[in-house]
Image (cartoon, grey):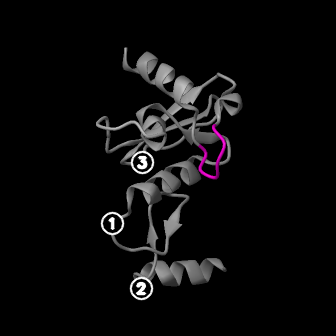
Amino acid sequence: VTEATVRHHLRVGRWTDRTPTVLTTTTGPLTWEQRLWVAVLHAGSRSMLGGLTAAEVHGLQHWHRDDVTVLVDDQLAFDPVPGIRIFRTRRPFQMWRAPGRLPVCRIEPALRASTRNAA
């Protein structure tokens, strides 16, 4: 897809830019799962869902937060995006990643990191 095609679809409202690096072909409100994908796609390949967001993906109930928490490599930096909380870490987070298509932290380190950041 060319840049001109992307600009055209955005201009006429067929697509929506969600972050400076992610656009969607869905123009209405996003589902929770779509918001998770937007967050990790925005943060790039060295990122994964963390904190209570990861715990909710793993099945934790009654602790939902509207913001999506993403863990990234300590060397990365991002401009703020509404609805996405980015935490930089020096931890070897690739060892923390749970199996599956969606990059998400295993529940134990996700909650451990979540409690540290809350203090």
Task: Look at the image and say whether residue 79 sits in the magenta stretch.
Answer: no
- Reading the image, the residue beneath label 2 is 12
Q: Residue at x 71, y 29 (%)?
A: 95
Q: Residue at x 51, y 84 (%)?
A: 8
Q: Main secondary structure of the magenta part?
A: loop
Which is nearer the eye, 48 or 63? 63
**What are the residue bounds of the magenta stretch?**
98-103
Mark 1, residues whose alpha carbon is within 10 Å: few (<14), some, or many (≥20)?
Answer: few
Q: CA distance from mark 3 to mark 2?
A: 23 Å
- Circle nearer the N terminus (1, 3): 1
Which is nearer the eye, 5 or 35? 35
Mark 1 or mark 2, whichever is nearer to me? 1
**Rendered image: mark on residue 81:** 3
10 is higher (above) or lower (below) than 94: below
- Reading the image, the residue beneath label 1 is 29
Label 3 is placed on what type of residue?
Val
Where does the C terminus fall, quadrant-wise? top left
27 is higher (above) or lower (below) than 83: below
Mark 3, residues whose alpha carbon is within 10 Å: few (<14), some, or many (≥20)?
Answer: few
* 81 with respect to 1 (left or right): left
Q: Secondary structure at mark 1?
A: loop
96 is higher (above) or lower (below) than 26: above
Q: CA distance from mark 1 to mark 3?
A: 16 Å
Residue 115, horizontal then vertical, whole percent: 42, 19
